[in-house]
Image (tube, rainbow, N blue to C red):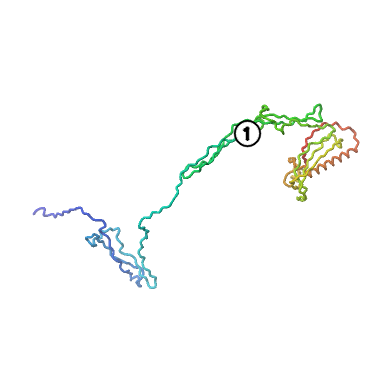
Amino acid sequence: MNSFDSFSWQVYEAVPCYTECNQYSWVVEPWSPCKINSEQNSLHCGEGIQTRKVRCVSTAEDDGGETVSNALCNQAEIPDRTQKCSLYCPRECAVSDWGQWSECPQLRLEKPVQTSSRCMVGCTVDCRLSAWSAWSQCSHTCGAGGQMVRGRSVVLRAAGEGRPCPEQLTQHRSCPVKPCYSWLLGPWSPCKIQGGQCGDGLQFRNLTCVVHDASVSATSKPVENALCGQLPLKESVLQLPCSVPCPGDCHLTEWSEWSSCELTCINGRSFETTGRQSRSRAFIVQSPENQESCSGQAMETRPCSGGKCYDYLWKTSLWRDNIRTVWCQRSDGINVTDGKLKMWVYGVSAGGFLLIVFLIFTSYLMCKKTKQHQSTPPQQKPLTLAYDGDVDM
């Protein structure tokens, strides 16, 4: 017996072959009628199960749809073999299943249509500016802090993506500092009387040319008068006549400034269109015995327009150490007896007050003359008073 006969030999041979893609596909048969579990539902209606057969077929032309093994088809795409279904019970509304989705409508043109419209593309234009103007005159004729300015204008504005115009169209720069020269008047000197202590004399003041930085102050330095130029007319007066009353003389002060225009009012209402202004001056008497020798008008008035009605009320502060302040206040809130305001006092009320004081003082002198003097009154020294026309109450 040959030893080879005791073995059975199997020979496998593999050769390459070509298989076309997608030559197998799934084919499904119609769904079976809906089957209801009659054991659980005696009415034979409600939910059930439908089944169908699924098989794999060859799509090759030679095979003609022959059924093949299911393993040859794509297992991931195998259709469902079962699905839920339902049979409508009596008296239930029955609707059919949803139909297939329709095809999406697409607008198709037989041939492309070219459309066009006119448009405007702006040209690129850069901003154009004029040349700088000349520098202006300095804002200050002298001193520091002066400014000069120059400017330019837009000749052509930018367009498109052109260079835009700058926001700054003016420039400023400081002026060269120039010294300032001006006349500086000194204060009036006391009344100087030649060869005596009373009588008529003269007052003097100095006029000096100074250099400064536009602010006349203590830092100003005197320089030559030629640098200041011509003298101003109002400041050219360097001396004025004056007088110092001698003992026994009667002397009147200068007239005060005119008061503000006031109307004669009753309860805040005026029955006239023309008001009155007043001004006053005071007597300076060296000896009470010579009071009668003084002559002249102490107060005068004149008509004015644009007057207002004012009421005057006495006001008092709180007591403090048995002392309190008393003042007269005008209806516009101004304190008219504190000596700070000079213009209102010369109204009718102030004139009446002066008249009352004058009458009281005259009565006192008349009463005093009835007494015999036991001794000669002492010689009075010259007296100089400065009166600005204000009256303090």
Q: Is residue 386 left or right of residue 136?
A: right
Along the viewing direction, whichever of 322 and 344 lies nearer the viewer: 344
Instruction: State the image coordinates of residue 360 (x, y, percent, origin top left).
Output: 84, 41
Q: Residue at x 24, y 56 (%)?
A: 20
Along the viewing direction, whichever of 51 and 199 lies nearer the viewer: 199
Q: Quadrant of residue 73?
A: bottom left
Along the viewing direction, whichever of 269 and 276 lies nearer the viewer: 276
Quadrant housing the C terminus: top right
Instruction: State the image coordinates of residue 341 (x, y, percent, origin top left).
Output: 74, 41
Q: Residue furthest left?
A: 1
Q: Which residue position is annotated with label 1?
A: 141
Instruction: State the image coordinates of residue 309 (x, y, percent, origin top left).
Output: 75, 48
Residue 189 makes an appearance in the image: no
Q: Residue furthest front?
A: 118
Residue 73 makes an appearance in the image: yes
Instruction: State the image coordinates of residue 305 (x, y, percent, origin top left).
Output: 75, 45
Count of picture labels = 1
Q: Residue at x 31, y 69 (%)?
A: 33
Tell me: residue 29, above or below residue 275: below
Circle 1: residue type: Thr
Along the viewing direction, whichever of 168 and 246 lies nearer the viewer: 168
